[in-house]
Amino acid sequence: MTALLDFSPEEMVAIRLSLWIAFWAMLCSLPLGLGVALLLARGRFWGKSLLNVLVHLPLVLPPVVTGYVLLLLFGRKGPIGRLLEQGMGIVLAFRWTGAALACAVMGFPLLVRSIRLSLDAVDRRLEDAAGTLGASTMWVFLTITLPLILPGIVAGMILSFARALGEFGATITFVSNIPGETQTIPTAIYFLVQEPGGDLAALRLTLVSIAISMAALFASEALSARATRRTLGL
């Protein structure tokens, strides 16, 4: 039992880096996820179905394919990556920031879907009533819509965070496995099981990953249930 709690410095670095990358992946994708969810839930425009498909594409594509596309676009020789490096000095490939980008892309569909479901559950009559009383669209959103969908936003953030913690294929394809820079819990486990004597360390990291993921799922379910009760007026 003691051996399961005896984390090496390298394992602790992988755990901290995973949490750091997952946090930034979730936080940076939140504004865009909220905007896209609003477009899909309330918008009427040509190409809405295409946008919906593109948003959910990472859920059905092999993660390695997503990582390779990111490498083509954001690598140093890619069109976007070249512009970022030359214009702003930002390099994503083989950096922790690139790992955060890959994790954000993979968790983005879960974030958007959770927020969109919350938006669909909002009683539009409340928003219409506020509008007839002279409230602006932004004020209606901030004072009525946002509080009502807040549990869905938080649930989506948690799911996105948990998905980022478990990301492997896109991350290793885009940023490789560099200890202390891009080596997260999943990539560390993958290489530990291939090393002689690495089974115990892999088991420790596996248990940590399971514990964090279960906590995230329980929290997400609790928030979803709360949102449902609020919608039903219970």
Image (cartoon, grey):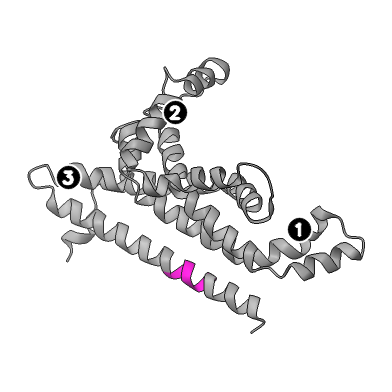
Look at the numbered disc 2 and give the secondary structure of its residue. Answer: loop
- Give the number of the mark in front: 1 or 2: 1
Amino acid found under the numbered disc labelled 3: Leu
> From where the camera sits, is residue 20 visible?
no
Q: Check disc 3: other Cα within 10 Å, few if <14, some if 14-19, many if 20+.
A: some
Q: Check disc 2: other Cα within 10 Å, few if <14, some if 14-19, many if 20+.
A: many
User: Disc 3 or 2, which lies upstream in sequence?
Assistant: 2
> From where the camera sits, is residue 228 visible?
yes
Magenta residue check for 168: no
Magenta region: which residues?
A: 218-223
- Is residue 79 depicted above or below 132 in this figure? above
Q: Main secondary structure of the magenta part?
A: helix
Amino acid found under the numbered disc labelled 1: Phe
Gap in Å between the C-alphas at discs 1 and 2?
A: 35 Å
User: Disc 1 or 3, which lies upstream in sequence?
Assistant: 1
Could you tell me residue 32's position as x and y percent? 60, 44
Look at the numbered disc 1 and give the secondary structure of its residue. Answer: helix
Q: Check disc 1: other Cα within 10 Å, few if <14, some if 14-19, many if 20+.
A: some
Could you tell me residue 140's position as x and y percent? 80, 60
Magenta residue check for 219: yes
User: Disc 1 or 2, which lies upstream in sequence?
Assistant: 2
Q: Which residue is mark 1?
A: 141
Gap in Å between the C-alphas at discs 3 and 2?
A: 25 Å
The residue sitting at 52% across, 63% down in the picture is 155
Could you tell me residue 90's position as x and y percent? 51, 24
Label of residue 92 in the image: 2
Q: Which residue is mark 3?
A: 192
The residue sitting at 38% across, 37% down in the picture is 66
Along the viewing direction, whichever of 162 and 47 lies nearer the viewer:
47
